[in-house]
Amino acid sequence: MDYSSNIININIYDQSVYAEYGYEGHELIEESLTSTVETLAATKPIRNRLRLVFHKKKSMKISEERFVKAYTNSIKNKVTEKNNEIKRCFTTGIILLFVGFALLAFDVFVAASMGEFIYEFFNIFAWVFCWAAVEIFTIHLVQLIIDKRKYKRLLSVEILFKIMGEE
């Protein structure tokens, strides 16, 4: 496979690449490093698998196995976070849609006999709820799914280490 267009080179100048905290006993990499990988990955074509090449000084004592595990844990946490946001967004959309339709039914069957002002008030109120649900399903939910796919792509990267100056 030709990786030439999908290689991301990152220089590590400091040994403190691990986060000061973990998640459920899992070690993570620094958020700034994760953010750098995300930003650089966004500049590469989506169709091909990425290859991350971390360049480190020979004197650095960074365990490659530990680093790969911490990287994987960090990205898995991002995928889990997006899954939770998708569930929350979907639930909110369903609730808004249900409330909107309930208000619309109330408007048609009850408020119509209460006068023009009350009818229009509930009509507008119902459509606002329905529109909010449509916005969640078409804008927010789609963006969360795109973000989740981006993180899943970052989980499948090939990670290599090179010593600076020994390319």
Image (cartoon, helix red, strand yellow):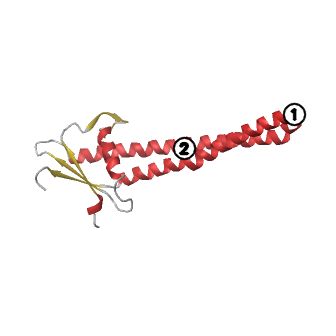
First in sequence, mark 1 or 2: give its number: 2
Residue 79 location, x and y as percent?
43, 46
User: The C terminus lies in which quarter of the figure?
Assistant: bottom left
Does dot 1 land on a helix, a strand or a loop?
helix
Name the residue type under label 2: Lys
Query: Can you tell which quarter of the image residue 103 is in?
Result: top right
> Which residue is at a point 60% across and 45% down the rendered structure image?
135
Q: Residue furthest bottom?
A: 1
The answer to whether residue 141 is left or right of residue 24 is right
User: The N terminus lies in which quarter of the figure?
Assistant: bottom left
Disc sitting over residue 136 in the figure: none
Residue 14 location, x and y as percent?
19, 38
The answer to whether residue 151 is left or right of residue 118 is left
Name the residue type under label 1: Met
Circle 2 residue = 87
Query: Can you tell which quarter of the image residue 16 is in?
Result: top left
Q: Nearer the viewer, residue 87 or 69?
A: 87
> Which residue is at a point 56% across and 42% down the rendered structure image?
89
Q: Nearer the viewer, residue 105 or 65?
A: 105
Circle 1 residue = 114
Residue 144 location, x and y as percent?
49, 47
Q: Nearer the viewer, residue 76 or 96?
A: 96
Residue 134 location, x and y as percent?
63, 47
- Mark 2 Cα within 10 Å, few/some/many (few <14, many 20+)? few
Closer to the observer: label 1 or label 2? 1
**Distance between the Cα atoms at labels 1 and 2?**
39 Å
